[in-house]
Image (tube, rainbow, N blue to C red):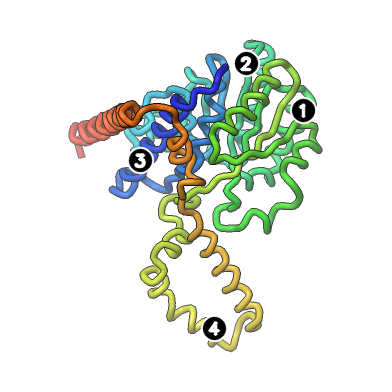
Amino acid sequence: MELDSVALYRKMLTCRRVEEAIAGLWYEGRVSGEMHLGIGEEGINAGVLDHLGDGDAVALDHRGTAGMVLRGVDLAAIVKECIGAADGLCGGNGGHMHLYSKEHLAASSGIVGAAGPTACGFALAAQHLRPGTVAVAFFGEAAMNQGMLMEAMNLAAAWKLPVLFVCRDNGMAITTASASVTGGDLELRARGLGVLGKAVDGSDVEMVWRVAGEMIERARGGRGPAFLRATCIRPEGHFLGDPLIRIARRPLAEVKPRFGSLVSATRNAQGAPMAQRVASLGKITSMLGRAARTQLGPVRDPVRRLRKRLAITSEALVKLEHAVELIVSGAVDKAVASKTATEKETPR
């Protein structure tokens, strides 16, 4: 299989536009609850999933929209599911964290670390029913501290299951710096379980594509599982409306309503010693500084980074991007129109 950078760019751009559109629907109040986006992770998703074909399976986490898009699931069905439409991918019952498509052998779960055991199930079935096929699990670095994921990796190594474990590492476990709650090196941890472990820059989709390709071919050949840690930046934080991101972007507007309470707490004679309070404020300031650095510049944005390297004419590039815009906007319009029509028909 040869690297096709133009095709990868189209896939990443499609994921970006779909998630931007869903974000717009969330801000309009059409999406209930939290919304976890994969913006900033497109290089990881596309670089890995470009190697999969019919019969291969994907286990996704709560940030699985892009994975479903790349597996070829109908875009309108995905959007309908996110807005709770009865004719959504899962009947409007799962939402964006529990997307499932039996046809595409793709399933997601909001349970942290659940992608590991799910992928092992897919891989065990592959060994017996579809020799030569593989399973891929996607999760964040914080999930590496979940027991069931470690157990899944151990089982995959013991049984030589054809599975690739993909860790998307943005350095934050929701609002906690991952380094403060994770011991050791993640690749070494994987190797300690008998799983091949490597790390890549997730903003470089071509690098991800090459390394993931080697690991997937290795798994197809019956040589066991692999672990790929891909670093990334997630500009919207853990979820849309992330308080750390809000404060980092609009410090005066967000901190002003809380300023009085902070001052009162500092002056209060009761409570923790002053040194401990100052240390806590220092940690909060450090987290806000990290949140402020989550903006996707041209170097860390996988979409913009690859766009600069494409060997095609400006005219061809504009045509490609326009085609993607039309496909995504058409799917979103179809989903919203369908939901609106259903609501009008439903008696109150």
Q: Which is more N-terminal, label 4 or label 1? A: 1
Task: Quarter of the image for the N terminus: give it.
Answer: top right
**Residue behind mark 2:** 133
On-image quarter of the C terminus: top left
User: How far apart, in angstroms, are the residues tagged by discs 1 and 4?
Assistant: 52 Å
Residue neighbourhood size for the residue with mark 3, other residues' Cα within 10 Å, grouped as few (<14), some (14–19), many (≥20)? many
How far apart marks 2 and 4 lie (CA) works out to 60 Å
Q: Which residue is mark 1?
A: 157
From what the image shows, is residue 285 above or below residue 30? below
Gap between marks 3 and 2 measured at Cα = 32 Å
Q: Amino acid at mark 4?
A: Thr
Snapshot quadrant of residue 47:
top right
Which residue lies under the disc numbered 4? Answer: 266
User: Residue 317, which numbered label?
Assistant: none
In the rendered structure, which amino acid carries the disc numbered 3? Ile
Which label lies toward us, 2 or 4?
A: 2
